[in-house]
Image: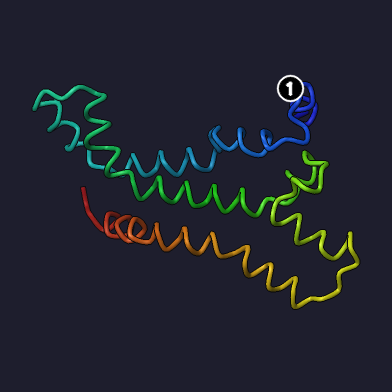
Amino acid sequence: MRYIAFHRLGWINTYAPLVIPVFFASPFYVFLLRQFFMGLPIELSDAAKVDGASELAIFWRIILPLAKPALAVVALFQFIGSWNDYFGPLIYLNDKAMYTVSLGIANMRTTYGFMNFAWIMAATVMSVVPIIVLFFFAQRLFIEGIALTGLKG
């Protein structure tokens, strides 16, 4: 069904079916953020209402800065899921020049009869580097999230 919709939109053999669906909500991420927001003390928004803040100002100035750790987790999980996706690019991309890293590594052996496993393992290690770099940049937010879970509202 999804393939037919993307085919009718003319998105086959483009990066659009790999990029655009990422921006729609996954049920897991919705539940994760809901649970995070339910854990925030209601007194914070009540105090802002007493001070005269609107709902948008409460969300923008109080709730959103507190949600940075949860949003970082969602962003990291989504990036890892998209980066390691194998079947999506395999279904939607026909041109081998457009293949993603995971498909490129898989095709090193199958298409070219490439049997140098040292090179395949080196390419696999190099494909993990962006995930590790992203994790190190987001590590501070993870520590803030762990510290925030210890607070009692």
Q: Residue at x 14, y 31 (%)?
A: 48
Q: Residue at x 55, y 38 (%)?
A: 26
In front of the other: 97 or 55:
97
The residue at which mark 1 appears reads as 9
In front of the other: 138 or 28:
138
In front of the other: 11 or 148:
11
Q: Residue at x 68, y 67 (%)?
A: 124
Quadrant of the rendered image containing residue 50: top left
Which percent across, then down, holds residue 73?
Answer: 44, 51
In front of the other: 93 or 50:
93
Quadrant of the rendered image containing residue 127: bottom right
Q: Dot 1: few (<14), some (14–19), or many (≥20) neighbours within 10 Å?
A: few
Which percent across, then down, holds residue 42?
Answer: 22, 36
Against 112, residue 41 (above or below) is: above
> Where, quadrant-wise, is the N terminus in this rendering?
top right
Against 132, residue 122 (above or below) is: below
